[in-house]
Structure formats: C-alpha cells, structure tokens
Amino acid sequence: MTLPDPIILQAPVGSTVHGLHITGEDDRDEMGIYLNSHAATLGFDPGPETIVERTATTRTGRADARSEPGDLDLVLHSLRKFLRLALAGNPTILMLLFAKEDVVMDARGSQLLELTPDIVSRQAGPKFVGYLKKQRERLIGDRGRMRVNRPELIAKYGYDTKYAMHMLRLGYQGVELLETGHLALPMPEPSRTFLREVRQGHIKLQDALHLADTLTKRIEKLQDSSPLPLTPDSAKVQDWMLAVYLEHWKAHAFDRKVAQHVENQGSQGQAPRDPQGEPAETSRHF
C-alpha cells in the first residue's frame, strides 16, 4: 500500500513508548496523522480516514494475522478524524499528543502539539472509564468471550496478563491526565514497575481487578475536581485545522497547474513558463 503524503506527525504509541515492553517480545505500534486531498475530502468518492499498514498482514496475507516481535502496526488517521476523536477525549488517540521519543513531524505537526492544552479536557474522563470497564469485562469474560488473543499467557498465568497490564495502564494514565493535564511517557515509577510485574504474571487476577475498580472510581471523582476545562476549545482547533487544509489544498492545486502548464509548453518545444507567464524556473523552485 502506498502511504498518504503528507504525514504531518508520526510516533510510537505501544508498549515501548510507555516503558512496558519486554525486549524481543513486542511488536511496534505507531500512529500518524496525514492530510487528505481536497478530492478525497469533498469529492463524490471520499478516501479513507484511517489507513492501517501491518507487516504481519503483508507477511502472511491475512488481515487478522497476529503480530510477532518486531512487526510494525501503523495506524494513520486523517487530521480531521484525529482531531474529532481527540476533542472527544479518546484515550488511544490522545497518546500521540504526548509522545516524546522517535517523533517525526513537520511544522504543522509541531503546531498541533502546541494545541494540546486546547484539545484535552474533562471529556476524556468518561472515555477512560468506558475503556477501563470494557477491558475489565472482556478480561474476565463478562462481555462476550474472554479475551484470548494470547492463549499462552492464559495457560501460564490463568489470565491474559498483557491485556490486564494495558487495562491498568489506562487507569493510571486517566488519573494522571485529569490531575495534571499531561501524560508522562514513558510512565513514571512506581506504576511502571508494578505494571511490568502484572505483565510477568506476578500479580493475582483479583488484585488487578480490584486496582482497576479503584482507578475507575478515582477517575470518576476527578470529573468534579480536575483542573482541566470542562470542554475543549473546539472552535480554536477547528479554525487551525481548516487553515491547514486550505493551505495544503491550495499549494497542491498550484503544483498541478504548474506541472500541467510545463508539460504543455514542453510538448510544443517552448521554454516552460508558469501560469502567470513567467519562466517556470525563475518563479517556482521544484
């Protein structure tokens, strides 16, 4: 698959960035943001707003192939979709705003990170709680079948310890975000060491579930005392987003116009000139 261009921000978001990885056992999870073309956004045949590139799928030919150590799982969202989810407080999406290591971005990506205080609000609280409760239910089988993506862990420890670790990670990070408006990556101690112990099967399932319930209650209580604003500054963020899209679309429209004009002039044996009548090489650097 050809990845979209431009990607304005991309960074790791998996176990490694949280400081919870085990060397030689983890795949690589990354997230990025790209700008849709004007045709893909406004045309009759809109393009996808999320693109997933998995080396496990490429290697096996199966969309549901399980990632192995070293595999890359890359999820790219359009800027519009990313901001829509971020403003709503989606925990997975918000992680990208706080990544610090191996971050690749252009000026627009940098501007987006500067908008983080306008994006993050108390609306994230119910989202974290919802994710926590859903993962708790799936971990023990209260919501459909038990989570069995890692049957080897269930066979060894009696439950999917990696899934439980990420459930509790969400709880710790939900509390941190509502208390401080920030997420430290990698996770601070002592929670990081404790979560690694959960992953390695040193913590009983009932203790992990009790902690999940405790963290859920703390997040719910913080809904009333958090220093974060009640809602994000959606108008400010939208104004910035529209300006970025319009500038991008205008620039690409000009590039196509110049390229077509150069091609037409060249086919007639004339010196290429830009649409304004000036020699292309003096008015535009390619």
Image (cartoon, rainbow, N blue to C red):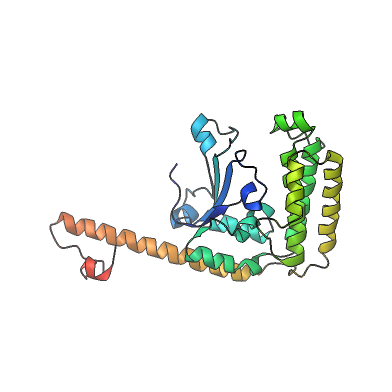
Residue 51 visible, this orientation: yes
Q: Is residue 268 left or right of residue 67?
A: left
Above or below: residue 12 compared with residue 106: above
Between 74 and 145, the one nearer to me in the picture: 74
Q: Residue at x 23, y 59 (%)?
A: 262
Of the 4 image quadrants, the one containing the C terminus is: bottom left
Q: Residue at x 38, y 60 (%)?
A: 252
Which quadrant would residue 124 be assigned to in this image?
Answer: bottom right
Residue 223 spot, x, y in % from top left? 81, 63
Which quadrant would residue 207 be assigned to in this image?
Answer: top right
Q: Residue at x 45, y 47 (%)?
A: 3
Counting labels gives 0
Residue 145 visible, this orientation: no
Between 42 and 265, the one nearer to me in the picture: 265
Residue 205 spot, x, y in % from top left? 83, 39
Q: Residue at x 61, y 42 (%)?
A: 23
Between 202 and 270, the one nearer to me in the picture: 202
Residue 90 spot, x, y in % from top left? 68, 55
Of the 4 image quadrants, the one containing the N terminus is: top left
Residue 174 spot, x, y in % from top left? 75, 57
Above or below: residue 175 compared with residue 235: above
Which quadrant would residue 80 be assigned to in this image?
Answer: bottom right
